[in-house]
Amino acid sequence: MTTSTTAAAGGPPVPGEGDAGPGGRGPVRRLLSGFGPAGPRHGRHTLSVDQVDALALPIGDDGVIAGVDAHGRPAVLGLNRPTPYDVVLIGGLWTAQVLALRAAATGARVAVETGRPQAWQRMLHAMGGGQNGLTVYDVGRVPPQGASAGTPVLVVRDCGMRPPRGRVVSGPWQSLLTLLPYLSPVAPGLLRRARLAGIQRVSPDEAAELGRTMGLPRAEVESLPALADGVTLWCADGDRQYVTTRPTDAETGLLGMPRRMD
């Protein structure tokens, strides 16, 4: 910071080291009020207008890493939001459980509504039996979660092909992920309301139906029946991206290798 012996605009002159003190006793070192003694003098750091555009801060997306994209870059799902956020995943339980684990790792609480609680028990025990960010409820028995900015919530609905109307819905800081194992009659309605949709390997007939419902290009419709295990086509607001979920060693030990069927 550059210091000066002149006062701020509108203020009285500030004596410097060469000014005489009271009674003419010689130089007096004055303190600059509120800033301590005058520091060393350095040149100012300035940028021209043309250089400002070159500035960049390495700030990435904030959220759950769902995997990597086609270029090997992290693909992040921003699940913790101040507005309601609905996600539909037409795919396997393995992917939903990996997303739940990773959401809990970011500090979110995860509430699972499921008709097959035994499929979540190993994961529940590994995370502390409901005391460490994950709770499992029967269908229709999920209580209000009290989500907030400090304690965001992800509700996972694992309720089969025809999930009933849920008591708990998405809201501020509470996202809702609905898992469908296959394309069912309720899927089009859920997809229309969703902000984000994930599609894993489906049959050619299901792919054609999804193409019509979601307006997918022909190339992507034809790719859906051949997607590998662990690969998901994520779609949001006209943007589509293939993402490969690669488990960590801990996730492999708990959930096994990627798979579409359970």
Image (tube, helix red, strand yellow):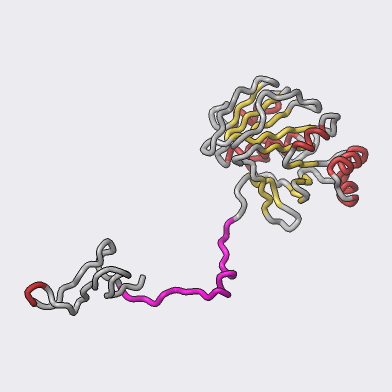
Q: Is residue 91 visible?
A: no
Q: Quadrant of the C terminus?
A: top right
Q: Is residue 39 left or right of residue 196?
A: left
Q: Residue furthest bottom?
A: 18
Where residue 132 appears, as percent x and y from the top left, is: 54, 31
Q: Is residue 109 left or right of residue 30?
A: right
Q: Image point 85% across, 30% down: which residue?
A: 184
Q: Quadrant of the N terminus?
A: bottom left
Q: Camera-side residue: 74 or 169?
A: 169
The answer to whether residue 188 is above or below residue 30 is above
Q: What secondary structure is the stretch in magenta mostly built from?
A: loop
Q: Image point 66% across, 33% down: which residue?
A: 170
Numbered range of the magenta stretch: 40-59
Where residue 9 appears, as percent x and y from the top left, is: 32, 70
Q: Is residue 132 visible?
A: yes
The answer to whether residue 154 is above or below residue 7 is above
Where residue 44 appears, as percent x and y from the top left, is: 41, 75
Q: Camera-side residue: 186 or 220?
A: 186
Q: Residue furthest front?
A: 10
Q: Image point 90% across, 50% down: which residue?
A: 218
Q: Is residue 22 left or right of residue 201?
A: left
Query: How many marks can you see?
Result: 0
